[in-house]
């Protein structure tokens, strides 16, 4: 431990967990800072709404996450869970393969129910995302404390990290699944390290790790792997073999849950867009080292290749915390030299994530390295929290202030150089951060509590400044979908009946009178999964996987856009009987933007129900065959007696045949891997038909019977078995640890770090 000359800079005394819990003062301190941290995060999370009330209902959150969560919540409340496959959502309905919907994660399930009972999706998005910002903040706080940081310093970084640039403008605003998985990673780190010290039962580490894995986001799984590896290095250097063995065993138990989540994704990838998962670099969202060095510049905009036609990012994506670089000259860095052994794991995490953050744009399943910058900052936060806990130097103030000033001015210059159009805001940011730095350096003379409050105040002011200048992430699309469920349904629910397919594009919608707004294009068309809460059974649904044949036939994108060629393909005959894809897909309504096909003429059996300046709505006039199932077409002289669907994953067709040869049955289902078909105990071959539809082939020697069609996610049984083995192993480890602690009558502590 370092010897500190200044009384005001004296770190907190070393207190153990049990001692701090027993003392009244320790109890108040134990809960006071976490409660303050939670309250600050909740309040600060409301600041972005001041200038942008749909800040949390943005891009993918509006197009995929919130609408799908609403739909999944409705399914849960109706008793349908887990919905591995939603055939009505077509390309976007293979939830098992999409993985990121966390079908096995109780936190996700609870939030789906919450979203489904709220009348406004933007409000629901705000509540859920604030919830996970708090989860993230508390995880950072606990992990900092576990590494010996003071409560006040832990709180400072626990509040700062959730509002760092990428976490706020990308994960929180846009990619909700990224936020939810990242929020659990520090909890894995805290619990696993505490277990290695003998202070926590292994079953809790398994449960937290399994929660992180079952979010379905591979970046969360990567985080678990890196954190556990870092702890193995840390414990191994100290040659604490029992703790090392326990970490390995718990890690294996957590790893056993991975097949349950990802085998369906890997098993389905052969028919999707994501078949190529190699290594390459096209520069997409690859930050440079210089971008990371500007981590304290609130208005620095990285010049990183992205989806937008703009030259760089429109938000400070590599920003971390305003006070890191300005306080560098004042920090007592000798702490790292004195405590390097217990901080080895932190160093491993920092190095690993730094290398991944500046890696090629695609590494197997992981693309766009900018996504990993927040995990890099997590390691930096823990390291700096430990250093900051030792207080600030108060000698040679002029020299230290001069260095701090140079760093501030350099950051402001680089910010101006990257985006000179924001010159006045760069200047304001420089003045604000300089004043805040002086305030904190002065406040530390009066105690760490005042210094912490000054740092928190700075985080709030900088956040207000950032969200005033950069009110939203315009490198992606805000969409401006209606977020009131009632408003969504009022526009299209009664107009579009039955299975509905639209042919529309975003550029045409943007050119619509009123543009992308509830009073504009969204009165007639919607994209992504926005039709789900609207109550329309639409073919369009957001997908990160896609289905290649279906997509190519209709030139359908991940967001549900299409093209004139796709409309023509819908009506072209697909078999000898002249059956069209519209019939094979059992469509009831077709919506066509007039800018795409100006005057579509109805085919036989169809009529124009509605036509205005913007869309033409075609509806089926003749009843569909086999109304109780999803059979779309048959061939080979077959007579279908009945067709009944038993949910989305099974169907039974009773048929008879004159024996005139082989027959085929085409279903209004995509041929996702995992389907099996039988008749009389005999397995039937399954093939892919037009647009990727599922086709069951019946040989000529089978003249009648019941075709039973069933679907199971690829790897489902091995995944269940592996997860159960992991659970049993974790329970055994937990029971053994409980028995040993009960026998010894006390906890063992193998870490030299300060903990409380």
Image: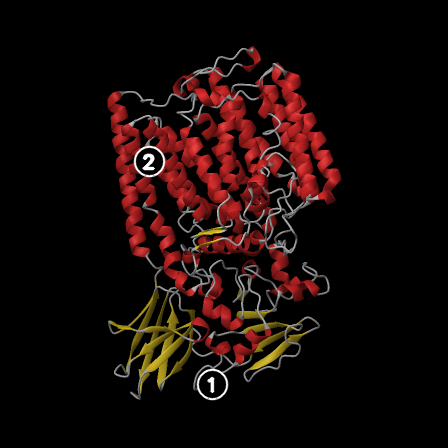
Asked if residue 120 can be seen in this view, the reply is: no
Query: Disc 2 versus disc 1: distance between alpha carbons?
Result: 61 Å
From the viewer's perspective, is residue 314 above or below residue 150? below
Q: Quadrant of the N terminus?
A: top left
Q: In this picture, is 299 found above or below 280?
A: above
Q: How many marks?
A: 2
Judged left or right of residue 744, residue 360 is: right
Label 2: how many Cα within 10 Å (few below 14, some 14–19, many 20+):
many
* Residue 710 falls in image quadrant: bottom left
Give whichever of discs 2 and 1 has the lower sequence position: 2
| Closer to the camera in the image, 209 or 399 | 399
Give how far across and how far down residue 718 sits, in percent. 29, 54
Q: Is residue 16 visible?
A: yes
**Which type of secondary structure does the marked residue at label 2 adopt?**
helix
Which residue position holds label 1?
578
- Specify the quadrant of the image occupied by residue 6: top right
Vertical position of residue 86 compared to residue 324: above or below: below
Q: Nearer the viewer, residue 183 or 439?
A: 439
Residue at the (64%, 76%) spot, across then down: 597
Q: Give x and y (percent) for residue 387.
A: 51, 23
**What element does badge 1 sit on?**
loop
Task: Report the side of 484 relative to 90 (left or right).
Answer: right
Judge whether 357 appears above or below 756 on screen.
below
Residue that appears at 55% across and 10% down: 7
Quadrant for the C terminus, please: top left
Mark sitting on residue 203: 2
Task: Identify the residue shown where x is 52% and y is 41%.
Answer: 373
């Amino acid at each position: 431990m370092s010897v500190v000359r200044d009384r005001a800079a004296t770190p907190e005394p070393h207190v153990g967990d049990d001692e701090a819990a027993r003392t009244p003062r320790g109890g108040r301190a134990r809960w006071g800072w976490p409660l303050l941290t939670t309250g600050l995060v909740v309040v600060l999370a409301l600041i972005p709404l001041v200038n942008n009330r749909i800040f949390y209902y943005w891009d993918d959150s509006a197009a995929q996450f919130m609408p799908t969560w609403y739909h999944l919540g409705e399914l849960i409340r109706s008793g349908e869970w887990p919905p591995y496959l939603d055939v009505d959502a077509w390309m976007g309905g293979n939830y098992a393969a999409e993985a990121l919907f966390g079908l096995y994660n109780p936190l996700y399930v609870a939030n789906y129910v919450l979203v489904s009972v709220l009348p406004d999706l933007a409000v629901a998005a705000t509540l859920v995302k604030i919830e996970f910002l708090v989860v993230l903040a508390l995880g950072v706080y606990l992990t900092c404390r576990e590494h010996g940081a003071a409560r006040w310093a832990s709180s400072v970084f626990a509040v700062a990290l959730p509002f760092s640039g990428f976490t706020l403008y990308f994960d929180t605003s846009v990619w909700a699944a990224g936020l939810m998985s990242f929020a659990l990673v520090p909890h894995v780190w805290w619990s696993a390290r505490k277990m290695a010290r003998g202070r926590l039962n292994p079953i809790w580490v398994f449960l937290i790790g399994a929660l992180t894995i079952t979010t379905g986001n591979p970046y969360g799984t990567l985080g678990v792997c890196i954190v556990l590896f870092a702890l193995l290095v840390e414990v191994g250097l100290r040659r604490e073999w029992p703790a090392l063995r326990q970490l390995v065993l718990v890690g294996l138990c957590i790893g056993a849950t991975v097949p349950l989540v990802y085998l369906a994704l890997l098993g389905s990838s052969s028919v999707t867009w994501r078949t190529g998962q190699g290594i390459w670099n096209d520069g997409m969202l690859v930050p440079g080292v210089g971008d990371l060095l500007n981590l304290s510049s609130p208005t620095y905009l990285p010049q990183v290749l992205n989806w937008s036609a703009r030259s760089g990012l429109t938000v400070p994506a590599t920003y971390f915390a305003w006070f890191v670089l300005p306080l560098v000259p004042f920090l007592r860095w000798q702490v790292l030299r004195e405590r390097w052994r217990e901080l080895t794991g932190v160093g491993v995490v920092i190095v690993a994530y730094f290398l991944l953050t500046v890696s090629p744009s695609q590494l197997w399943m992981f693309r766009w390295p900018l996504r990993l910058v927040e995990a890099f900052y997590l390691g930096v936060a823990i390291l700096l929290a430990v250093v900051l806990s030792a207080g600030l130097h108060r000698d040679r103030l002029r020299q230290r202030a001069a260095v701090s000033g140079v760093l501030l001015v350099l950051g402001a210059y680089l910010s101006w150089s990257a985006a000179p159009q924001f010159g006045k805001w760069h200047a304001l940011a420089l003045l604000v951060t300089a004043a805040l730095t002086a305030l904190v350096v002065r406040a530390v003379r009066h105690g760490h509590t005042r210094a912490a409050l000054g740092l928190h105040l700075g985080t709030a002011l900088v956040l207000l400044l950032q969200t005033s200048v950069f009110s939203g992430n315009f490198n992606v699309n805000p969409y401006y979908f209606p977020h009131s469920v009632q408003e969504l349904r009022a526009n299209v629910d009664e107009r579009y009946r039955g299975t509905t397919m639209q042919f529309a594009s975003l550029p045409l919608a943007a050119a619509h009178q009123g543009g992308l707004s509830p009073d504009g294009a969204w009165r007639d068309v919607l994209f992504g999964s926005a039709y789900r809460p609207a109550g329309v059974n639409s073919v369009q649904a957001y997908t990160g996987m896609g289905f290649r044949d279906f997509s190519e036939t209709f030139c359908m994108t991940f967001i549900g856009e299409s093209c004139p060629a796709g409309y023509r393909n819908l009506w072209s005959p697909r078999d000898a009987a002249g059956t069209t894809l519209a019939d094979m897909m059992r469509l009831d309504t077709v919506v066509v933007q007039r800018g795409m096909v100006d005057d579509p003429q109805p085919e036989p059996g169809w009529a124009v129900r509605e036509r205005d300046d913007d869309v033409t709505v075609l509806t089926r006039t003749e009843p569909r065959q086999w109304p109780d199932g999803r059979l779309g077409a048959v061939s080979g002289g077959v007579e279908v007696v009945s067709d009944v669907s038993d949910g989305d994953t099974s169907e039974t067709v009773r048929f008879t045949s004159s024996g005139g040869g082989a027959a085929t049955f085409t279903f209004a289902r995509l041929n996702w891997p995992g389907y099996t078909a039988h008749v009389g105990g005999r397995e039937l071959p399954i093939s892919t038909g037009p647009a990727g539809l599922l086709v069951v082939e019946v040989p000529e020697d089978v003249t009648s019977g019941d075709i039973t069609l069933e679907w199971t996610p690829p790897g489902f049984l091995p995944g269940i078995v592996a997860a159960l083995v992991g659970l049993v192993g974790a329970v055994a480890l937990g029971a053994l640890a409980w028995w040993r602690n009960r026998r010894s009558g006390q906890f063992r502590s193998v870490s030299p770090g300060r903990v409380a």
